Image (cartoon, rainbow, N blue to C red):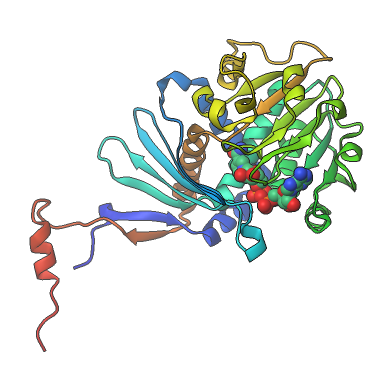
Amino acid sequence: MLPSDKALVPFLSVDHMMQLVHRLGLDTVLTGLAAAIEEDFRRWNRFDKTARVAAHSPVGVIELMPAADEAHYAFKYVNGHPGNTRDGLQTVTAFGVLADMATGYPLLLSEMTLLTALRTAAMSAVATRHLAPAGAHVLAMIGNGAQSEFQCRALQALCGITHVRLYDTDAAATAKCAANLAQSGLVISTHGTPEAAIEGAQILTTCTADKRQARVLTDNMVGSGVHINAIGGDCPGKTELAEGLLHRADIFVEYPPQTRVEGEIQQLAADHPVTELWQVIAGTAPGRRDDRQITLFDGVGFAIEDFSALRYVHDQVRATGLGQKLDLLADPDDPRDLYGMLLRAAPNPA
Ligand code: NAD
């Protein structure tokens, strides 16, 4: 028996996600994702929010990230395994579901490895747009792995970045990133130390992967009047910035109960003052106050960003018809006759 259309769940594969980005254009997708995130951050109090549920091992973490509003529920499955690249595997992979609150039925099952890179980049751009000094156009990109080009392109599309200064402990990662951005219109330079990379940059983004308390940026490296996106420190015991630098910065976070455990601020006292970024976006808290201030977006990645991303992609799937239909949900003619459906599916005796 074939399932009816109401039981078939749209599925967006990695290949379809790539087709979607090429059909719409990367800038359009990044701009659309940023708009969806801002829209959802502005209605923050309407969401059912949960710090993500994590299973840790010595080499990495697997997490579930749920969020819901009145109409939709979403979750993402995501891992973070910094050693994976040694075996030819991604550090971060993900997939997720958007579901209908009214019936509980899934509306979309999607790859989210690419979508996480896109939404994380869009999120950095949203934070940068609200916090960076006026006229900022030079980005230092520290950590040139899978996320890095997306970060650069989002800041180009949404924040007017023209120059990118690259640094990674692995020169091959920097060469890959520079080659990938060669046709982007950005002026790219590569550097052998983090100190050289951040020289003259008004925006510093760290997006490194190392499961330890790293000191990618130390206090004496960073002058006043810059904005920092610290993206790679997103787990207990996994940070990127020296504590002294945190004390000089005004710190902006997504969801404090999660960031206090996972973000750079895990190094600080539990009551260290932070501003929730949604309040800046909603206009109820100030962002940057003056040119000398160091602003820090301590980004760990929060479930509402994935909710926004899935909501955006669901709209695009409906508009473009991309994706395939999965026979994921049982669909007996009589909803209470699940067993009868199984019986009737028995193969005929030969
Ligand atoms: P990746 O493994 O592809 O790249 C990480 C890069 O960091 C590598 O090229 C590595 O050589 C480099 N690196 C490690 N230590 C460094 C150091 N001290 N200085 C400079 N470079 C260094 O990983 P990815 O997929 O690009 O992810 C990067 C980080 O971002 C990971 O830690 C991941 O968990 C995190 N992440 C955060 C979010 C979020 O929402 N905040 C989302 C996705 C990924």
Q: Residue at x 83, y 20 (%)?
A: 225
Left or right of 297, for residue 219: right
Q: As rendered, which of 172 and 213 lies closer to the eye? A: 213
Residue 305 locus on image (x, y percent)? 53, 35
Q: Is residue 165 visible?
A: yes
Furthest residue toward bottom: 350
Picture layout, residue 211 above or below residue 22? above
Q: Quadrant of residue 154?
A: top right
Q: How many numbered markers are drawn?
A: 0
Q: As rendered, which of 272 and 103 lies closer to the eye? A: 272
Q: Residue at x 9, y 60 (%)?
A: 339
Furthest residue toward front: 58
Residue 160 locus on image (x, y percent)? 79, 33
Q: Residue at x 26, y 55 (%)?
A: 329
Q: Quadrant of residue 134?
A: top right
Residue 39 locus on image (x, y percent)? 53, 26
Left or right of 265, for residue 137: right
Residue 291 locus on image (x, y percent)? 83, 15
Q: As rendered, which of 5 and 239 lies closer to the eye? A: 239
Position of the C terminus, as image quadrant, is bottom left
Picture layout, residue 60 above or below residue 275? below
Left or right of 83, for residue 9: left
Q: Is residue 31 visible?
A: no
Position of the N terminus, as image quadrant, is bottom left
Q: Residue at x 57, y 16 (%)?
A: 279
